[in-house]
Amino acid sequence: MKEVAILGGTFNPIHIGHIIAAQEVLTKKNLDHIIFIPTKNPPHKNFKELASPHDRYEMVRLAIKDNPNFMISDIEFKRDGNSYTYDTLIQLKEFMKDTKFHLILGFDALKYTDMWKNHEEVFKMASFIVVNRANSDSEMAEEIEAKKLKYNARISVVKIPDINISSTEIRNRVCNGESIKYLVPYEVEKYILSHGLYRGEGLERLWVYKKWSKKFIKTRKIYTFIKCWERSNKTG
Ligand code: ATP
Ligand code: MG
């Protein structure tokens, strides 16, 4: 029987936190594969600047293409409506027989599982592997114990080096014109920059605005600051 773990996420964009977590789980749990599954419509998030499913899929593909144990699935893009882990697991179990499924979650995401569709069922269908995300061990142990008691859940922890990076931070850096080098794989960085992702919207892309703002660099800086600030308050 094969053992695989699913790492679901918005991946808006994928960053080294995701990749290191996946590799640590793969080796420490001795699994066959990790399947990265980008969500189409994150039901619990209201993104103002969510890159298209195609862009997010491409960035994940580029990030993992050299690792034979990493796979990507577009299963959630192909379904209508919101992306629910419950539906994904049912579908995967249908065409991947003889496979034991685990779900990888950062500790922040574990806290929200009570909001998932049919979460009690999901706890029965898969075991959970939780990775730390710059949180204390005791905080994690408490939450996991509570979930185990409440749902009879199978939850284990894989300790990874704390990587205090988020996609929100990457988006904000790009919008502010700051470097994202080494925070995302090289090809992902190239993709973001060449496709103009996360640069903030509207005015600052217009030619007239650019010309005008060259003369008024201070004004442009203030404008960009406000746009980025607005974005960071509306995303995540
Ligand atoms: P955002 O800031 O947009 O929420 P994110 O960095 O949290 O992005 P997601 O796509 O929301 O990335 O996360 C997918 C999964 O990966 C979640 O389970 C999340 O907890 C986990 N994860 C993300 N970043 C890290 C990290 N730096 N360390 C450990 N786990 C992480
Ligand atoms: Mg997140």
Image (cartoon, grey):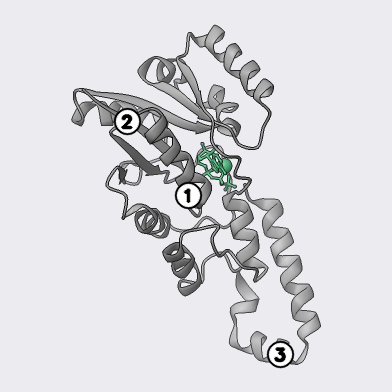
In this figure, which residue is indicated by the disc labeled 3?
214
Q: Residue at x 64, y 63 (%)?
A: 173
Within 8 Å: ligand 1 and the Cβ of disc 1? yes
Q: Position of residue 213 (x, y in %)?
A: 72, 86
- The type of residue carrying mark 3 is Lys
Distance from label 2 to label 3 (Cα)?
A: 54 Å
- The type of residue carrying mark 1 is Phe
Instruction: Count all numbered tags in the image, as a single digit.
Output: 3
At mark 3, the secondary structure is: helix
Q: Residues within 10 Å of mark 1 (few under 14, many from 20)?
A: many
Q: Earlier in the sequence, mark 2 or mark 1?
A: 1
Q: Residue at x 21, y 30 (%)?
A: 96
Q: Is residue 10 above or below residue 188?
A: above
Q: Position of residue 139 (x, y in %)?
A: 68, 23
Which of labels 1 and 3 is toward the front?
1
Residue 163 in sight here: yes
The label shown at residue 11 is 1
Q: Position of residue 132 (x, y in %)?
A: 58, 32
Quadrant where the N terminus lies? top left
In this figure, which residue is indicated by the disc labeled 2?
31
